[in-house]
């Protein structure tokens, strides 16, 4: 995850908008822009990466010796 803080939001609401940048077989990349609604400007931008994991194998119960 990477966040760039561009401007402070001193008062008033903030609005975040997420955009799917790429969805592959093993990875998803999302960009999030945070806007200062009161001043109508971009306050922060984040980029997030998520790994897509395969299904887990069932856990084998321990056997007594």
Image: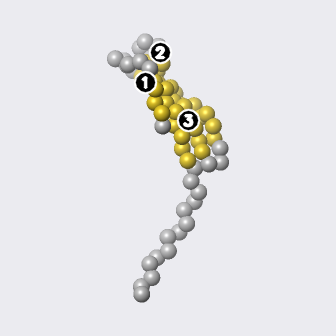
Q: Residue at x 46, y 30 (%)?
A: 3
Q: Which residue reaches farthest right?
A: 25
Depth check, mark 3 against mark 1: the one in front is 1
Reading the chain from its start, which is encountered first: label 3 or label 2? 3
Q: Which residue is mark 2?
A: 41
Reading the chain from its start, which is encountered first: label 1 or label 2? 1
Give the alpha-carbon distance from disc 3 to disc 2, as whole Å. Answer: 20 Å
Q: Residue at x 60, y 45 (%)?
A: 27
- Contact (Cβ within 8 Å) of mark 3 with mark 2: no
Q: Quadrant of the C terminus?
A: bottom left
Residue 7 image point, x, y percent: 41, 18
Identify the image quadrant of residue 23.
top right
Q: Is residue 65 visible?
A: yes
Give the mark count.
Answer: 3
Q: Which residue is mark 3?
A: 30
- Contact (Cβ within 8 Å) of mark 3 with mark 1: no
Above or below 39: residue 20? below
Reading the chain from its start, which is encountered first: label 3 or label 1? 1
Residue 52 image point, x, y percent: 57, 50
Q: Residue at x 54, y 62 (%)?
A: 56
Secondary structure at badge 2 equals strand
Q: Residues within 10 Å of mark 1 (few under 14, many from 20)?
A: few
Specify whether 46 is left or right of 29. left
Q: Residue at x 51, y 37 (%)?
A: 48
Secondary structure at badge 3 equals strand
Residue 26 image point, x, y percent: 62, 48
Q: Which residue is mark 1?
A: 5
Q: Is residue 15 visible?
A: no
Above or below 39: residue 26? below
Give the alpha-carbon distance from disc 3 to disc 1, as whole Å. Answer: 17 Å
Specify whether 26 is left or right of 6. right
Secondary structure at badge 1 equals strand
């Amino acid at each position: 995850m990477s966040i760039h803080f561009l401007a402070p939001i001193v008062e008033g609401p903030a609005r975040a908008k997420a955009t799917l940048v790429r969805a592959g077989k093993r990875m998803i990349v999302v960009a999030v822009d945070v806007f200062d609604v009161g001043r109508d400007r971009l306050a922060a931008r984040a980029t997030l990466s998520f790994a897509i994991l395969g299904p887990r194998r069932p856990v084998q119960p321990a056997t007594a010796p």
